[in-house]
Image (spheres, grey):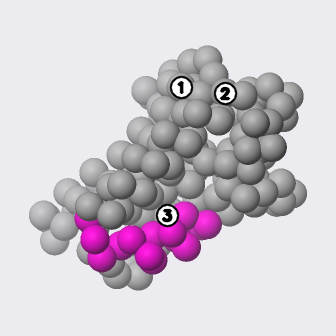
Amino acid sequence: MDKFCKLVSSVFYIGYLPVAPGSLGSFAALFLYFFVKDNPLLMGAAIVICLFLGFLTAGRAEELFGGKDASEIIIDEFTGMLVALYLLPVTMGYIVSAFLLFRFFDILKPKPINMLEKLEGSLGVMSDDLLAGVYANLILQASRLIF
């Protein structure tokens, strides 16, 4: 089970890379995105599956990697990025904007995102990135209505 936790929480060991693992995890989500982007139901299912796997493994992975939201754990960024892209037009502008906004919120963690990361275990690992993805998505959905 520990190998499974490491495999999933690090998104097939991408989280082990030494430079910018969170950004790489967000970028890796684009691989899955391109397979599910044209079907909102399939994309929604992908998000739910990633959420389930993240909540299942992230808390244990913290123990295995020896730290709160250890840098190797990137399933949260992977999932948050998918949330940021959900139901947006499939254009390079929206994809790049979603990536930049998601990383902005994930790195700076404005309130209440910063409060969520203080939660224990999987809930703390996953929820701040989910909210960062929701913020990015809402901004881009609003921009669609305005422009």
Q: Which mark is residue 99?
A: 3
Q: Judge whether residue 95 is colored magenta.
A: no
Circles 1 and 2, Cβ within 8 Å, touching? The answer is yes
User: What's the distance in space between the residues labelled 1 and 2, CA to CA?
Assistant: 8 Å
Q: Earlier in the sequence, mark 3 or mark 1?
A: 3
The kind of secondary structure element at disc 3 is: helix
Report the amino acid beneath label 2. Answer: Gly
Residue picked out by circle 1: 123
> Is disc 1 surrounded by few (<14), some (14 to 19) or many (20+) residues within 10 Å?
some
Q: Horizontally, is 72 left or right of 146 in the view?
A: right
Marks 2 and 3: which is nearer the front?
2
User: What's the distance in space between the residues labelled 3 and 1, CA to CA?
Assistant: 22 Å
> Is disc 2 surrounded by few (<14), some (14 to 19) or many (20+) residues within 10 Å?
many
What segment carries the magenta color?
27-40
Q: Earlier in the sequence, mark 1 or mark 2?
A: 2
User: What's the distance in space between the residues labelled 2 and 3, CA to CA?
Assistant: 25 Å
